[in-house]
Image (tube, coloured by chain):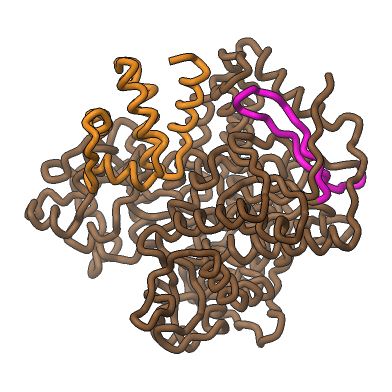
Chain colours: A orange, B brown
Amino acid sequence: MERADYERLRWRSIRRALLELDITLTRFLDGGEFDKLNDDQQQAFAVLADMEDYDLWDLINGKAEIDDPRLASIVEMLRKS
Amino acid sequence: MSIPVLKFDAVIVGAGGAGLRSAIQLSEAGLKTAVLSKVFPTRSHTVAAQGGVAASLGNSEEDHWTWHMYDTVKGSDWLGDQDAIEFMCKKANEVVVELEHYGMPFDRTDDGKIYQRPFGGHMSNFGEKPVRRSCAAADRTGHAMLHAMYQRNVKANTQFFVEWMALDLIRDEEGHVLGVTAMEMETGQIVIFHARATIFATGGAGRIFYSSTNAFINTGDGLGMAARAGIPLEDMEFWQFHPTGVAGAGVLITEGVRGEGGILRNSSKERFMERYAPNAKDLASRDVVSRAMATEIKEGRGCGVNKDYVLLDITHLDPATIMKRLPGIHEIGIQFAGVDCLKEPLPVVPTCHYQMGGIPTHYSGRVVMPQNGDMSAVVPGFYAGGECACASVHGANRLGTNSLLDLLVFGKSAGDSAVEDLKAGRAHRDLPKDVADKTLARISALDNRKGGANVHETRLAMQRTMQDHAGVFRFSDMLKQGVSKILEVEKAARNLEIKDKSMAWNTARTEALEMENLIEVAKATMISAEARKESRGAHVRDDAPDTAEFPNGRNDAVWLKHTLFSPVDNSISYKPVNMQPLTVEPVELKTRSY
């Protein structure tokens, strides 16, 4: 991912409407988990980060599930991060 | 260096509930309106508000705005201005119905009216019995509200500047406000927004505390900008706290956990609530529990390396009961405390939630400050609404669901007042020659400083100082030390260094600029709290206890007045509380008890 694209994604991940997402996504990005992902997985993370806050938080805390296996695997990582 | 100038009739900073509500008034009046926001509007922290919005619609049972007014005055511990409170409670029905017309999907009764649910502190007939007054959209009221208002703004041609951060308020020599300087995050470009009216709707600054339920975005940018422009901050000692947030994270643990049998313990595993409330124990009121927790921590019986939290123990409860009755608690424990609450107790601490004080405003939304002997003279061209403003309707403590009402009513009135002033002929005034100098100097200092303070460490030092010295229960000696400490942190905050010097998406620079706003709020809070030598509402001091002479530690003879913190010289002055409503009899002073 290009630097500017990464920094844009980082800003959109560390300034959310919900504190729960601020903490979870900041930890994932700044804790090095994101860097371990391949390009396709990083794009999948970007798709999740673009979601509405409650929709994403419901996925992470297990209240909702997502069908797309590509996204589901990232959600699983966020749950454990 | 030539800085681009964008000219608008009105510039609004912040696209949460108050900003969007103001923008509707301005754009629908045909005025060219810009809204600046650090994030996409529907990612503002208003989204997190779940409880609902108070309005005495009387859809479920008899209700009246005067009863709502009584509850609000009582909730404020009589520090709220009764003219502003009357204005807000009377307007509540109108703004809620408008929202319904904007498409807000309120919960409904079987006959199609807006459904109303009960909420703590909402009473009928002047405190007699509970009444259903809160209007909600499931548990996503704030979220639904933002979506409805954003769509309305799109229709009205409001111009949004998303991922822009306002940096400084522009004031001329006569004190008029002429707009803001701002930075586009994508490019790092600094731009001047030159406006006939400037409205701040930047939300609260809960991130000054180590433990806060506020999202990271709540860095008090509007308060910081106002303070740097010499505008005082009102009643900053008053912050609402919840007793049990996850230590180190701030994520709320519902009070239902204690209801189901959760026990609070200190470092020696003692059930300390038995000493503070022998009968109610862990089920004592929120205030009592918070104070007990703070006392245990202050007296060295806290847990962890820094002895700065206590434990909430539910390991004795049946795991099936926990999973059934307290859904989500297990996940929250694992996610934010790294603790399996079925096996180990959760680390918890009283956690900051809402800022009652802010930029002083009249109920019309116009910003006011002391000038030439008038304690509430209007600052021409400047308006504010929502959590960043202090009208003051929340006084020393906010009534539940009045936060969403505040941003609707005062967002709208700030917009209406701006429209009125512009239509009366307020023109663009000439920009001062040095219009962007201060902003450029701040940016340049950040970019060029060597050997300065680290942003993350400085923020942590501020948050720890605020949590330890000006938390939910305050001690005279700690407040005095806190003032010295926060002034030390301020020196670091004015000497920040960043490693990343790039222009595009430089989040290190943005966070440093946020820190410069946070410190203004932290300093105002600490100095205002140290100065107020009574207990009132959310400001509770150990040396102002509940006595026969001063019930709840409140001393009206001396302290029935608003604090004004002057950022120019860190001094405090006071102005009277307005006890005179607009049309009805005042709510007379009495002891606040529930």
Magenta residue span: B173-196
Q: Is residue B570 visible?
A: no
For residue B59, side relative to residue B175 (left or right): left
**B307 vs B324, nearest the viewer:** B324
The quarter of the picture where the C terminus of chain A appears is top left
Identify the residue shown where x is 30% and y is 65%. B284
Q: In the picture, residue B434 is in which quadrant?
A: top right
- Asked if residue B183 is positioned above or below residue B352 in the image, the reply reads above
Percent of width and height locating residue B558: 66, 67
Query: Is residue B307 one of those drawn in magenta?
Result: no
Query: Is residue B185 one of those drawn in magenta?
Result: yes
The quarter of the picture where the N terminus of chain A appears is top left
- Asked if residue B11 is positioned above or below residue B289 in the image, the reply reads above
The majority secondary structure of the magenta stretch comes to: strand
**B233 vs B43, nearest the viewer:** B43
Percent of width and height locating residue B422: 84, 58
Going by the picture, which residue comes out furthest to the top?
B450
Percent of width and height locating residue B582: 71, 80
Percent of width and height locating residue B23: 67, 54
